[in-house]
Amino acid sequence: MINKNIIALGFVSFFTDLASAVVTSVLPLYIVYVLGEGVDKLGFVVGIATFVSYGFRFVFGYFSDKYQIVKPFVVSGYLLSAVTKPLLYFASSWISIAGLRGLERVGKAVRSASKDSLISAYSDKKKSGKTFGFHKTMDIAGELMGSIIAFMVLFYFGHSKEVFTNLFAFTLIPGIISVIIVMFFVKDTPSKKKQTSKLSLKDDINLLPILLIFFAFTFFMFNDSFFLIKAKEAGYSLAYIPLLVIVLNLTQTVLSYFFGLKIDKLGAKKVLLISFIFGIISIGFLYFDLIILGFVTLGVFLVASVNTIRAYISKNAKNKGTLFGVFYAGVAISGALGAVFTGMIWKYFGQDVATLISLVALVIIGFLFFIFRRKN
């Protein structure tokens, strides 16, 4: 049976990610097609948001372990995100959007490693894949609801600038609900003696090779923002593009718990390899303009890979908060640089070249991981 604190955290993530999905379902379209900025500018926005979101997680993960600060980081992180998303209502350029997205992602950075440590603290260690699978299901269910709301609003009210900005303002409501839940319905982790010595990664050095391979894959894997722009370039209407986000999130919602169970049964390395295969297939579908299939397989990749890495760290790491922080910091660097790289290649060489480079690189990395897995 899943602990009630994890269930409460699931609802916190549901409402937070509902708000996030309302933003992310339409923000790339708003930047490129409403404000008239280029895909390269979208790449910078995604890169800044990704770097801030993941880069500072190492710092807060480290302090969470060293000083046993868990719930205060979780609460303050959710609060910061809740109050900054609606401020996009006032943003009118890619620079202001990048600044606000970066500030909102600081909230994500503050809470993420501590939240994962809290989930781990209330999990059955032998079934951490199941627990993280449940939490990810609630997470993605919120994203699914948010993308449905975005679609319905664009479908019935059109896609003027005012419609987009009103969607951004709406996110204050689910954001505040999530803060109330985490403040009053989630307990802190059981108190432990505070660390007085320096934490060392030497205890967890054997976990780093898989993380490094995942970082390389993340660099060349398209962010879902580029999937949305590819859909528009393939002929999809602005009003209907959020339906593709619904497909993406529905895929993750349906499969999250399933992959959590498979991680416990098959092991992290095997499930991670499966996720890489689906990631490669998704870029292949994108290259041939099979957009819907691309979003479905992207959903499989995202839910399987993230659940796998989080469960792998939960099961094997001694300094969990620090290792979660290392994981998120690595994703920050690889994801941010990858987004900027993709945006620049797309802008100056075209979408086909950008997609082909991604596809070839991912195949090579996937093959190298296949060899690594067989030898270790």
Image (spheres, rainbow, N blue to C red):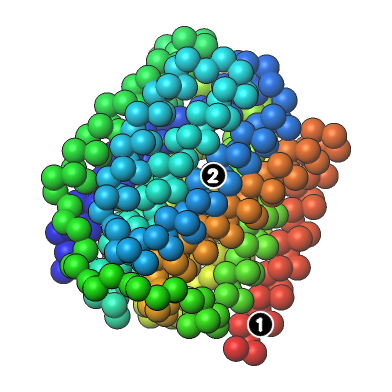
Horizontal side of 142 relative to 346 (left or right) equals left
| 275 is higher (above) or lower (below) than 42 | below
Q: Which mark is drawn over residue 52?
A: 2
- Find the distance from the CA under tag 2 to the CA under tag 1: 31 Å
Instruction: Judge by depth and name the residue closer to the eye, 311 or 295.
Output: 311
Q: Which mark is drawn over residue 156?
A: none
Residue, far front: 196
Circle 2 residues within 10 Å: few <14, some 14–19, many ≥20: many
Give residue 13's position: percent from left, percent from top.
Answer: 31, 46
Instruction: Judge by depth and name the residue closer to the eye, 259 or 315.
Output: 315
Question: In the picture, residue 331 is in which quadrant?
Answer: bottom right
Instruction: Judge by depth and name the residue closer to the eye, 349 or 322.
Output: 322
| 76 is higher (above) or lower (below) than 27 | below
Q: Which mark is drawn over residue 372?
A: 1
Quadrant where the N terminus sits is bottom left
Residue type at numbered disc 1: Phe
Mark 2 or 1: the one toward you: 2
Horizontal side of 272 relative to 233 (left or right) equals left
Give residue 85's position: percent from left, percent from top.
Answer: 41, 28
Give residue 41's position: percent from left, percent from top.
Answer: 69, 29
